[in-house]
Image (cartoon, rainbow, N blue to C red):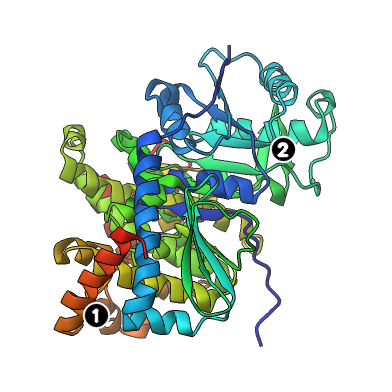
Amino acid sequence: MTQFTELQPGRQRLKRGYLKCMLWFFGRAVQAAARVDPGVKSEFAAMPAPYTFCLGAFPNGPYMVMEKNDAGHVRHLGASFGQTPVHLQLMFKSLDCMFLVFTFQENTTTATARDRLFVSGDVPQACAVVRIMDMIQVLLLPKPLAKLAVKRYPAWSLARHTLVRAQVLFRAAAGF
Amino acid sequence: MTALLRFFSRTKLCFGSHALAHLPFELSAMNGWKPFVLTDPPGKDARLHLDMARAFRNSDIPLGIAALSDDRPGACQEMEDLYHLFVDKGYDCIMALGTGPLVQTAKLLNLTVCLGPEILRSSAGPEQLDTPLLPMVFVPTRPSEGRETATKVTLEGRTFASEFLLPDLTVIAPDIMLGTPENQILDAGLTCLAVCGNAVAFSGNPLVRAHAATGIRLVRDALPYLVRHPDPDEIFCRKSRKNRCRPLAFLAHAAALSGIIRANTGDLTPRPSDNLSGRKAALALVKDLKARKTLSPGLSHLLLLLTDPDRYAASPGSRRADAAILAVETFIHDVSGTLETEAPNGDA
């Protein structure tokens, strides 16, 4: 006889909570770095305005939504799209895939090579977002962790490694 | 001028660490939102369906899991039971978690759901089918012989053939393959070697030959390691477990490729090794290569695939075919410890 059971897979509340916190702080750090870090600033300058992109996990999030408005200011819009049209979606195929990246078990490049990300939108802008992610990770994390998170640790100036990093951390914590 | 050729493969291969985590996305991309999972007794005993359920957490996709038992009734009756379960509960795609007969059952279920249960009862059903079927995912739980990714299925003597019987997606997750018995690993590897070796030596289709070359490289890299490290206790050590995962994934990948090759070798006349498996198939390959070495355009390529470029370059062009056959024999001997190359139709 065939045994039949129906399973309703559960939710991973801890993983989801951790990722929500990470994305919340990450979004604020992107907003801060867009004002003080020259690399992030130039990446955003090359994007069209207005432009909205989101980073998240398929199918139920969590998400991080960023916007560059007409004036060129970059804002973190939080965790939901709302009524905002999103020009670029950069999504991990599952919450587990996102967890691997945000716990630094895999860097973004490896995750892309292992087919864990998909993009809905322009590929050049998606590449720019990945570069921004890498720069933010270098700015936020101590060097040993950042080395795990990016493919190659960048050789930045001392001022960028110290002053800009301090500014980004302070602004991200303060939220402006 | 290149002759007209045809290569068909609707199977997407997805493999590696955390490959199962891709399933919700891949299924939804095929418009599958309620999968019906078929598993076999070994898979059920190893609780692999729970690994599957774990991969679907956070996705809100419910899973129906049917564990086939050993004391199975007649194929038609079983298929009717599965058909009613599938239709009554509104499933929309099929996942086969296992190998061999289980995948045949999954293919038959797909046919039954799409063409109706009367196909089970009619004595002369359609044999070549052109109707698209439901999305089907194949998740092997051990390296197999590759017949799962082929285009044919048999029900009580009747053979149905359709390109749509190929799984749409094959997910190779090495974590769930640990614990595969050594003899099954050896059989799977040698069968893949036979299928791929046959294609490299005799197929005129460059795409088939390219797939076959990849399959041979995967078998060459994986099988000797798996045969030389048979200790099942090793899987409890984290590092050994990781070391064993990689070749197992290679072998499962080669098996899936050999199925795709089988589905595309229409330009080959049937070979003695086609219906054999394991060591018999490998020995049949050697016999076939010896018998037809003057007719084989790609035989010397086998030498390059099974040995190294230096040895290939050091062999004179006129001797490469013999060296290739010797390399195949040596490989079979190394992994299975046999030198006998007598008729494969016997009890070798």
- State which quarter of the image contains the C terminus of chain A: bottom left
Helix, strand or loop at label 1? It is helix
Residue occupying image coordinates x 19% and y 77%: A163
The amino acid pointed to by label 1 is Asp
The amino acid pointed to by label 2 is Thr
In percent of width and height, residue A11 lies at: 45, 32
A157 left or right, relative to A11: left
Residue occupying image coordinates x 39% and y 54%: A23
Q: Nearer the viewer, residue B53 or B182?
A: B53
In percent of width and height, residue B184 lies at: 36, 37
Q: Which mark is residue A129?
A: none
The answer as to whether the residues below labels 1 and 2 share one chain is yes
Query: Which chain does tag 1 point to?
Result: B
Query: Which chain does tag 2 point to?
Result: B
Q: Residues within 10 Å of mark 2 (few under 14, many from 20)?
A: few
User: Where on the picture, by quarter, is residue A120?
Assistant: bottom right
User: Where on the picture, by quarter, is residue A12?
Assistant: top left
- The reply to whether the C-beta atoms of the residues labelled 1 and 2 are less than 8 Å apart is no
B192 to B135, vertically: above or below: below
Which comes before the other along the chain, label 1 or label 2?
Answer: 2
Residue at the farthest bottom position: B1
B122 to A119, vertically: above or below: above
In percent of width and height, residue B31 lies at: 68, 46
- State which quarter of the image contains the N terminus of chain A: top right
Q: Label 1 belongs to which residue?
A: B310
B35 to B12, vertically: above or below: above
Between the residue at mark 1 and the residue at mark 2, the CA separation in whole angstroms equals 46 Å
Q: Residues within 10 Å of mark 1 (few under 14, many from 20)?
A: few
Q: Label 2 belongs to which residue?
A: B159
Helix, strand or loop at label 2? It is strand
